[in-house]
Amino acid sequence: MSGPGHNGGPTLEPGASWRRHCWGAARAALLPKLPIEIVRLRVKRAAEIGLDYKTYAGVRATTGHDIIAFLFSTNALRLLREGDRMEAAEAARLAETRNLSQLLAAQPPLDPARVRDALGAQGIAVDAAIRAPGIAQSWSETRRTLRTLLAEARMPADQVLVIGETALEREWSEAGRMAGFLPAARYFAREAAAPAG
């Protein structure tokens, strides 16, 4: 039950403890049996696409699939106006990823084709780009916009990780039924702003 007055505590529906026990037992049975060769391959894959192993393993465990593409918002790349360029270290990081497609959703007023070209000039290959779904779009319109991008790039939604900055971009992963959402600050390991004083 959720709604007004709900404190977010555990469910009081019958069987909750049994379901929690079954889930825990299934996870415990799975983890020790993962061969070391598989773990090594997954650690290598995480490094290849620029993720820490914990994040990669979490997405993989949730979806059951490898990550084959990232969908970046221009907010995540800190491209806010025409002519903006990515920070050199972050651009180099994206240019160094291997065996991974990179998709782009350009926030208005940015033109997706121009941003794609500008990123190409920084050595970043963008496989497909669209105008980002806006706040005025409905859930189904957002899903349709994202599905159009994925169809153009020939990517299954549940293997694409959204990397963004805002709550609206977090919703893209849900609307598009994608692999998940990762804040850009975490992906790029951006330092938190130092407190004034």
Image (cartoon, rainbow, N blue to C red):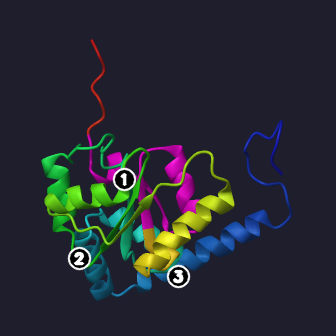
Using the numbered discs, state the Cα–Cα distance from disc 1 to disc 3 in whole angstroms.
50 Å
Q: Please tell me in which quadrant of the rendered image residue 142 appears.
A: bottom right
Residue 126 vertical placement versus 99 (above, below): above
**3 or 2: tag closer to the N-terminus:** 3
Segment tinted magenta in the rendering: 161-190
Percent position (x, y) of residue 127? 32, 72
Residue type of the residue flagged with mark 2? Lys
Q: Nearer the viewer, residue 17 or 116?
A: 116
- Mark 1, residue position: 111
Q: Are marks 3 and 2 in contact (CB under 8 Å)?
A: no
Residue 114 vertical placement versus 20 (above, below): above
Residue 138 vertical placement versus 34 (above, below): above
Q: Residue furthest right?
A: 14
Nearer mark to the viewer, of 3 and 2? 2
Using the numbered discs, state the Cα–Cα distance from disc 3 to disc 2 in whole angstroms.
24 Å
Q: Secondary structure at mark 2?
A: helix
Residue type of the residue flagged with mark 1? Asp
Q: Secondary structure at mark 3?
A: helix
Identified at 29% across, 56% down, the residue is 114
Disc sitting over residue 29 in the figure: 3
- Mark 2, residue position: 44
Q: Is residue 73 magenta?
A: no
